[in-house]
Image (spheres, rainbow, N blue to C red):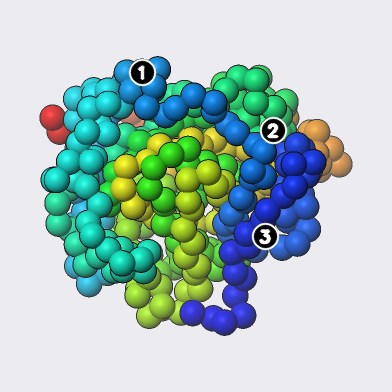
Amino acid sequence: MCSNSPKIMVFRPSLSEFKHFTRYIELMESEGAHKAGVAKIIPPSEWTPRRKSYDEDDIMSLKIPNPIYQNVQGDEGIYQQFRRQKKTMTVRKFKNLAESEEYKTPEHTDYKDLERIYWENIVCHTPIYGADVTGSLTDKDVKAWNMNRLDTILDVMNDMTIEGVNTPYLYFGMWKSTFAWHTEDMDLYSLNYVHVGYPKTWYAIPPQYGQQFEKLIDQIYPTETSSCPAYLRHKTIVLAPEILKKHSIPFNTITQEPGEFVVTFPYGYHAGFNQGYNIAEAINFSTPRWVEYGKKTKFCRCFGDPIKINMDVFIKRTQSDMYPLWLKRKGEKSVKKKKCMFNDSHNDKILKLVLYRIHPYKIVNYLD
């Protein structure tokens, strides 16, 4: 790992600094926080997102619609994650499972020891992850850093609601439940808060090394990446730190404790795992600096990327001098696309169906 590569910064804002979300993100970036791809924020002690206990019935009775088994396959630090959907369960049932003998966090001495245990046992015993649950646990009257109203340009410039992007999602983790290597949809920023439970372990690659990381993925998965220019958006690839070190790709590791925020920055690849039962809340957001990243985003072309934001309104408001050129290039691309479209014959329809059914990103839809 390059000793000169950017390191993850940790911020401890005062209560007055913490009141202004966008302004504080700008302050963090003025100090170079975005260069590491991820930053941690420890909020002031006076700030409380929720007054009631996290064991109250309003949380425990919540339903996790699509909990998933995460089956990891591979060896020698190179793995892929395949997902199998379970039946809907309540948070209470999920917590009981997470704290049971079968799924609970193993005995360990410190975070490094737990990280070692994770990688030594990554293909053993399939964890369950309660991911992408619509909702928020933050009290409605909380003003600062409330994910229901961050009021960034993603909210004020776009009239549409996209669940999990400009509205918050809840994540219910257990030991070894994993988020694979990825950047956010449209290469947006993200904000993640651990409400309660065990910490999260994060790995992050500085954005300046993002293309180097993508080239490594091209080498490891040449067939898949030649078919899809944004294969990492499938969120199936889990690479151990040793593989990044072997290929001289700088990265950082950080632990996010309960009561702490993690911000991921545009085009910052990140991955990680939950150290045990926890509840996290997350959302995407944007700043004017993001617009250039949004314009250049690569999309998965296997089935159409699930999240695709029309950039017109953002460019018109933040880069008005470039707006006419943007529309011109957009029109030229649209014409080329129409010329290249194949006839949707009966055989083409069959081929699409076969590809859809066997693709690892969609495997969750076809297993009981």
Quick one: SS at disc 1?
helix
Amino acid tagged 2: Ala
Disc 2 to disc 1: CB gap under 8 Å: no
Left or right, residue 236 beside residue 102? right
Query: Which x, y percent locates residue 65?
Result: 30, 23
Q: Mark 3 or mark 1, which is nearer the start of the sequence?
A: 3
Q: Nearer the viewer, residue 289 or 62?
A: 62
Q: Quadrant of the C terminus?
A: top left
- The residue that disc 1 covers is 57
Q: Amino acid at mark 1?
A: Asp
Side (left or right) of 347 relative to 342 = left
At label 3, the amino acid type is Ala
Tell me how far mark 2 sits from mark 1, CA to CA: 26 Å
The label on residue 27 is none
Mark 3 — residue? 33
* Horizontal and vertical percent position of residue 69: 21, 40
**Where does label 2 land, which residue?**
144
Single out the mark in the foreground, 2 or 1. Answer: 1
Mark 2–mark 3 CB contact (< 8 Å): no
Residue at the spot 40% in from the left edge and 37% down from the top edge: 279
Work out whether residue 198 or residue 236 is closer to the camera in this orientation and state it: 198
Q: Earlier in the sequence, mark 2 or mark 1?
A: 1
The residue at the point 23 percent across, 23 percent down is 88
Q: Mark 1 or mark 3: which is in front?
A: 1
Q: Residue at x 78, y 52 (%)?
A: 27
Q: Secondary structure at mark 2?
A: loop
